[in-house]
Image: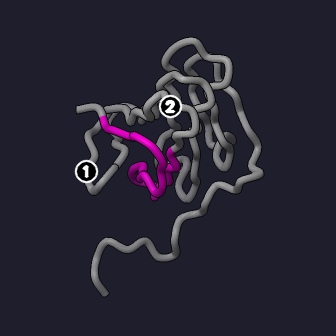
Amino acid sequence: MPTGYMIPPPPTIAANATVAAHTDSATLTVADAGKIHTNTGSSGTVTLTLPKASDAAGCSLRAQVTAAQIVHFLPVTGEAIFLGGDGVATKYLAIAGTIGNFCDIYSDGVQWLVTKYSGVVTKEA
């Protein structure tokens, strides 16, 4: 079998999942998995610090832009978020501040992987 496949596919965030609004930066826990995290009411960039990938193995999270401000996913020190086959340790993933942009990430137990997104999503260099 060719490499690059995730079998079984990672869990997808449901359209009717619980919504958690963040007006300021926050540290997420495993209990926040399976939720849609928004920046409703924020007046600046919101950084969502992720739990350790090993603690969140098998979990997915979504960040959805609902206020025209940037949202960051930030892994713990030494971990990476992979986008387009590349990840840089301890660097954030940025979701552009356009209402409607979103990004789904999944923990395979070692690192975080972007599994779906809409709009402009970039990695910190």
Residue drawn where x is 28% and y is 82% of the image? 2
- Which secondary structure, mark 2? loop
Residue 13 drawn at (x, y percent):
64, 55
Q: Amino acid at mark 2?
A: Thr
Residue 114 drawn at (x, y percent):
43, 52
The residue at the far bottom in this view is: 1
Other-residue count near label 2 (Cα within 10 Å), few / some / many at <14 / 14–19 / ≥20: some
Instruction: Give the overall secondary structure of the magenta segment.
Output: strand
The quadrant in which residue 21 appears is: top right
Q: Which residues are magenta?
A: 103-123
- Judging depth in this view, the residue of 116 and 5 nearest the camera is 116
Q: Is residue 115 magenta?
A: yes
| Foreground: disc 1 or disc 2 | 2
Residue 12 drawn at (x, y percent):
61, 60
From what the image shows, is residue 45 above or below residue 61? above
Residue drawn where x is 71% and y is 33% of the image? 20
- Determine whether, in the image, residue 29 is placed left or right of residue 18: left
Which dot marks residue 86? 1
Residue at which label 2 appears: 98
Q: Amino acid at mark 1?
A: Asp
- Which secondary structure, mark 1? strand
Quarter of the image that includes the N terminus: bottom left
Residue drawn where x is 28% and y is 76% of the image? 3
Quarter of the image that includes the C terminus: top left
